[in-house]
Image (cartoon, rainbow, N blue to C red):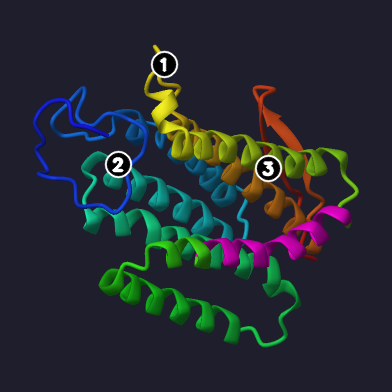
Amino acid sequence: MADGISSFWGPVTSTKECCEQNYIYSSYVAEFYNTVSNIPCILLALIGLINALRQRFEKRFSVLHISNMVLAMGSMLYHATLQRVQQQSDETPMVWEILLYMYILYSPDWHYRSTMPTFLFLYGAIFAIGHSYFNFGVGFKIHYVALCLLCIPRTYKYYIYTADASARQLAKLYVATLVLGSVCGLCDRFFCKQISSWPINPQGHALWHVFMGFNSYYANTFLMFCRAQQRNWSPKVVYFMGILPYVKIEKPKVQ
């Protein structure tokens, strides 16, 4: 939207903007709320990373939590500057992250252990190079949605084969935060003109960031539970301070 005070980063060069006035609080931060709303995602991913390391989960989950943090940091950089180059730091990690989810979801039944990570790594690298040169725009959105849709069948299979009520609740929270976040983001995108006339802007895109931070955390926690079940690690969902769920495991003792 229209600028408030002068910009440290220069004219906006990104291909998209959200329904938030630019440079209202600082000349260094274009979209203040859309920038700081990524902090919950970083904190939740850090909590997940600590849990994964402390209980010695497979490295894939540590990398997954780190990818969540990288994505949130890239999003902060993009919304703070609204520059086309920094836009890549938001969009490219989105694809890398979903490729990692695909690996975690499908790799347990993949018989050739090295082929899937090699293919996904090369795919992600080629996409990053192509996107930096051609800036796919609408093509990026279609591509990302297609990758997300590929994850749905396997995620649903994990859900229906999970009998634990607490773990199934994680999956339900994942869906709920996805729906709520999507509604906020879409309203911000398509009803900006009407929202701008309100006394207070609800900052729908910022709410999208917050909901998606919890969404990623719930998804990661659910997948950690499912993987622990596959490894016979006796997983159970417990709550930190009675609020935040995480997975606690008991690995079989080596004889």
**Residue at the disc numbered 3:** 174
Mark 3–mark 2 Cα distance, whole angstroms, equals 25 Å
Q: In the image, is residue 122 above or below residue 173?
A: below
Indicate which disc residue 198 carries.
Answer: 1
Nearest to the observer: residue 104 or residue 89: 89
Q: Are marks 1 and 3 in contact (CB under 8 Å)?
A: no
Side of 98 relative to 107 (left or right): left
Q: Position of residue 48 (x, y in %)?
A: 56, 44
Q: Earlier in the sequence, mark 3 or mark 2?
A: 2
156 drawn magenta: yes
Residue 232 visible to an observer of this rendering: no
Residue at the spot 11% in from the left edge and 35% down from the top edge: 7
Q: Which mark is residue 186?
A: none
| Amino acid type for the residue under numbered disc 2 | His
Q: Of callouts 1 and 3, which one flags the residue occurring earlier in the amino acid sequence?
A: 3
Residue range (magenta):
144-160
* Residue at screen point 12% across, 26% down: 5
Q: Which residue is mark 2?
A: 79
